[in-house]
Amino acid sequence: MPSTEDYDNHPGIWRNHVEALDEAAQAMRLDTLDGWRHIRMIKPASSLIKRDPNASWLTVGDGHFGRDGHILTQLGATSVHATDFSSPLLEIGKDRGFIGSCSLENAEALSFADNGFDFVLCKEAYHHFPRPYIALYEMLRVAKKGVILVEPRDENIDRGMKSATKFILRTLRRKRVMPHYFEEVGNYVYTVSERELEKFMLGMHRTSLAFLPLNDHFTEGLGEASMPPKSDGEKTLFKQMSDEIAKRDRQEKRRIRRSSHLVAILFKEPPASEMIKSLTDEGFRFALLPENPYR
């Protein structure tokens, strides 16, 4: 298993977070506009929790003091184990009673047994991984029922009309280079698409996925603003964020622009009809893939 020091600048970044203990207190607050954002991203998992209240959950890449695991617990999950590539932040979360069970884990080489947890949640961490497909394979391996990804969408693959128009114009100008992004810590940003996840599942001989478009908007100051907003400044900030999300929702509905994020559930086995109905009622679209005829 590779050392954490082998992965770009992530260890140093996390050490800086550990040194800023006031940030720990801030990150563990969910009564802020930023906390509202993170609850909103994980809330689609509540359908799974309601249908399967005794299911065990694993979070992967849960770097901000186990916040994702804490939110799952708040949504009703009774068994949650939080993991991250660096343990100091998780230990702070555990020491302060923010989370319970936790451990240091490399997403590319999880130490758990096959089918060790019912569900695995990875929220906004997949796109940081150096080799995300290896990590996704590992998550599917340790999941008994399914993996839930909440990640930024690759709009260069999942195209809305706006993105498609830009692509055509670039092609006509012979500028067909697709944009690529890197983060300050050193990693390439792997955004996700429905098509790529479908191909991954077909390669693993799995045939059931569910997708939910999700729009998000981040701006500075959300972590310090109360939710519900109290001051005029906080109310203005919330309105700006809400208006931007509503705008993206309208664009998504009209296929002008695809959603900023994608919630994807990768089922290990085809779900029961009751689960399909529950998720469909919540706005999920099911992608039932073909069986491999040569297997």
Image (cartoon, grey):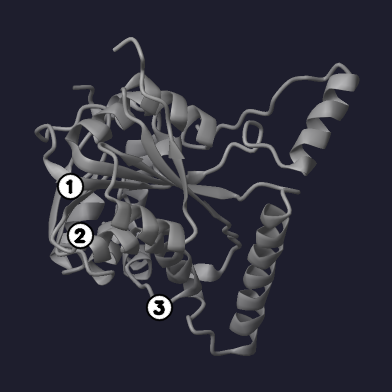
**Mark closer to the chain start, 3 or 1:** 3
Which residue is disc 2 drawn over?
52
Residue 189 visible here: no
Q: Position of residue 68 (x, y in %)?
A: 31, 58
Taking depth in this image into account, of 106 and 263 the one nearest to the observer is 263
| Kind of residue at disc 2 | Asp
| Kind of residue at disc 1 | Asp
**Mark closer to the chain start, 2 or 1:** 2
Q: Are marks 3 and 1 in contact (CB under 8 Å)?
A: no
Which residue is disc 3 drawn over?
31
Q: Are marks 2 and 1 in contact (CB under 8 Å)?
A: yes
Which residue is disc 1 drawn over?
118
Which circle marks residue 55 in the picture? none
Q: Secondary structure at mark 1?
A: strand
Q: Position of residue 10 (x, y in %)?
A: 37, 37
| Left or right, residue 87 beside residue 8 | left
Taking depth in this image into account, of 207 and 187 the one nearest to the observer is 207
Residue at 31% x, 30% y is: 135
Bin the neighbour count of mark 2 within 10 Å (Cα to Cα): few under 14, some 14-19, many 20 and up.
few
Which circle, 2 or 1, is nearer the viewer? 2
Residue at 21% x, 27% y is: 109
Which circle, 3 or 1, is nearer the viewer? 1
| Left or right, residue 204 beside residue 35 | left
Identify whether 245 is placed above or below 269: below
Taking depth in this image into account, of 95 and 241 the one nearest to the observer is 241
